[in-house]
Amino acid sequence: MSSAIHQLSASEAARAIRAGRLTSETLVAACLERIAARDGELAAWAHVAADASLAQARALDRQPARGPLHGVPVGIKDIFDTADMPTEYNSAIYRGHRPRADAAAVTLLRQAGCVVLGKTVTAEFANLHPPATRNPRNPAHTPGGSSSGSAAAVADRMVPLALGTQTAGSVIRPAAFCGVIGLKPSFGSINRTGVKPVSDTLDTIGLFSNTLEDAALALSLLSGRPVPDFASQIAAPRIGVARTSRWNDADAATHAALESAARRLASAGADVKDAALPPAAEALFDAQGLIMNFEAARALAWEQSNHREAISATLLKRLDEGWAVSREQYDNARQTARDARRQFADLMRGYDLLLTPSARGEAPLGLASTGDSLFNRVWTLLGVPSVSLPSGSGPNGLPLGIQLVSAIEQDTALLAHAQWAASALARAGRRHSPAQLPGTVPAGSVST
Amino acid sequence: MSSAIHQLSASEAARAIRAGRLTSETLVAACLERIAARDGELAAWAHVAADASLAQARALDRQPARGPLHGVPVGIKDIFDTADMPTEYNSAIYRGHRPRADAAAVTLLRQAGCVVLGKTVTAEFANLHPPATRNPRNPAHTPGGSSSGSAAAVADRMVPLALGTQTAGSVIRPAAFCGVIGLKPSFGSINRTGVKPVSDTLDTIGLFSNTLEDAALALSLLSGRPVPDFASQIAAPRIGVARTSRWNDADAATHAALESAARRLASAGADVKDAALPPAAEALFDAQGLIMNFEAARALAWEQSNHREAISATLLKRLDEGWAVSREQYDNARQTARDARRQFADLMRGYDLLLTPSARGEAPLGLASTGDSLFNRVWTLLGVPSVSLPSGSGPNGLPLGIQLVSAIEQDTALLAHAQWAASALARAGRRHSPAQLPGTVPAGSVST
């Protein structure tokens, strides 16, 4: 088992630890070894707490299990406060910054017996200025952002689970680009205390993992939502294919991956129909950016007022756009969002899931941009839960993602239906086109 | 003028500074003198930055006016981060805590030329454990909470303007108890970055002042909302008297003050009718506490996990109640709030204002409790703007407040209508019962 320890999913590792077949210390050591071997190239980590993590793991090995992920290491995006590690937001303004307290989400993970392995690289203030992190599937490409390090670390199997945040598309997009599972829960699912704000209306804590089971366990631990019973059979879902008005902004490979998934899900028994977004929801493609920039300008007021020279030109431009938005425009955008949430709730009486692209295409070449959040903005502002599943690959052989979306607060049902979909796609993939599904692994199918 | 300088409203003082009749340094010195004379008894301040404030005032006196409140000192509730002053949340856990950055609201005030005079006393973590602050109208009574120091400092004319926050009733209630104006803007009006969270769904930054003009100017500066034109005549508002299902929880003096205000506003030309809250809004009396406690338990997870012994028994009990709420109960309460917001928006098509009590009665005797937030919870969870105006007094001669409420985002219209109401009540008071209106002063009516 030793050579593959760092590849275990969080749930597999926790089961092995509970059964006495693995120690947390061995697992953490394997992850640290993987990081030592690979992070020079990938730059996924802003800080690795090697000694402290091993010490915590040894302490946990002497205790009864505190939760379903006892002994499992996690990566934390470097916009979450940690009292025992630097918290720098990838900004020179905060070099060496050490907050007084841990973020609420970090505390909950620690209380449940997780080991905080370190802080993963974020784009500057979780915004759009790209970091140095590379895509593990092909280091010449961006891993996406702003949760770049969390996506890359989980994709490279440096750690089985990582926290990120999404304000536009910072969980779903990097998950798709790196070929892992990204979960953006319903707005307000996970407490944000101690997370550096970008936009109060939008900031949502999310998760990166290699299995849906891991995402479900971590979400349950952090939000109190129930874990779906992945072992039980559920009815085939009613799926709406949401191409949206921006369909032509996705590339041909993304079109093909989505249409193929829709066909295969229908073959597996799902009731698949086209779903048009209601008018107010369509308006959120624009409203999201306006709200985000208005709020980000104010959230970073102190930094602009006191350290303007240390902020990237990319970010300053966006903050200036935020100051140029009038209060009336902002209030109107928020009213549109309220209308859209109501219309979307009505739409979702007819569907269990919407199927829509996770991104415009595969990860762009180079590190100059983390890619485009276009296909994520609407769902973030609606506040509805969504998950990205790896599905197919693009012209450069990099992973593509399909995004599944449910109604607000239906996170547990979303995960159950996503598991149904992942299993159906994996079966179809085995029958017809195995190369189409490099990363879609049914929960629990990888044996320890 | 010298003896009354500390009594000037923020707008009066700013006008005098702009006209060269007053310096910021003289004003700040007068406020510091008032604090030195009175705060030994009242304990409104957690930290007074005397030397730094005077230095900032002198610097501002050498500059052209940066904004409409240039040179005006403000008090900041001690749950807002300040990089140059301690930020302690009235908790021993944070003794001497010095954050890296200023809160966004503090930065905006400083950019506009305000002087941060110091930090005002908060209840522990802006929750319910009472602080040592006393009511300036009668030091044997509580000033209310959790923004206790801000209300007391403004009421005692130690400072003309102060920031607070409201999660249940922490702005409107202490404003009423202390006989000042309290403004709780629409949810999301003022950016919360750098404010210690209690409840993401509820926490709202608010203002204390002695005139509506001051509240309007400060809100405009902090939110970008327009200032109403107080000089122009507006049509008499349509007013709904919202006694609510909890009317019998208010005392006889509060009943009398509200009924008297309703009669006088009708006499002045307002269209006054009874307004029943829609059913989902009535349900928010209970839903608010459930949401607040669920979120507060998580927001203070690090403190409970690492410093449980330093948290008051009062707060621990409430946090334990929060942990006992299930995710399903919490989600249901949030769904009720969404329904209530929709129903309330429909109701408010028929009214410009609702008139409702600010509190159950006058400030309770003693410091063992900061009073009851009952008559504030619904409006906070609805996210709608409300203002408390001093109106009448109770059996102990302490001030009573009436609360005016508008539809979401109608903050500017609320302030304009509140000014109409305050003027109408002041005229009626002069004609019939001057003793009924000790604190209601029309903006600009106090000459410098």
Image (spheres, coloured by chain):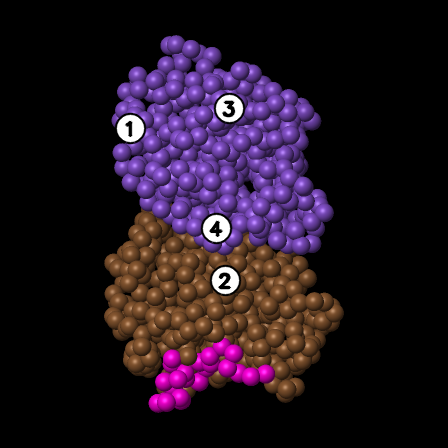
Chain colours: A purple, B brown
**Which chain does the residue under circle 3 lie in?**
A
Q: Is residue B447 magenta?
A: yes
* Mark 1: few/some/many CA within 10 Å (<14, 14-19, 20+): some
Q: Which residue is mark 2?
A: B226
Whole-Å distance between the Cαs marked 1 and 2? 47 Å
- Chain letter of disc 2 in the image: B
Q: Nearer the viewer, mark 1 or mark 4?
A: 4
Number of numbered discs overlaid on the protein picture: 4
Q: Return the residue nearer the eye: A330 or B207.
A: A330
* Label 4 Cα neighbours within 10 Å, binned few <14 / some 14-19 / many ≥20: many
Locate residue A393, reporting x and y percent: 49, 18
Residue at x 31%, y 20% (from the top left corner): A266
For residue A261, say whether it is visible: yes
Q: Position of residue B261 (x, y in %)?
A: 33, 79
Q: From the viewer's side, name the closer residue of A136 and A12.
A: A136
The local secondary structure at tag 4 comes to helix
Is residue A75 positioned above or below A320 on the image? above
- Amino acid at circle 1: Arg
In the image, which residues are magenta? B424-448
What distance separates the C-alpha of mark 2 from that of mark 3? 43 Å
Q: Determine the image quadrant of residue B423.
A: bottom left
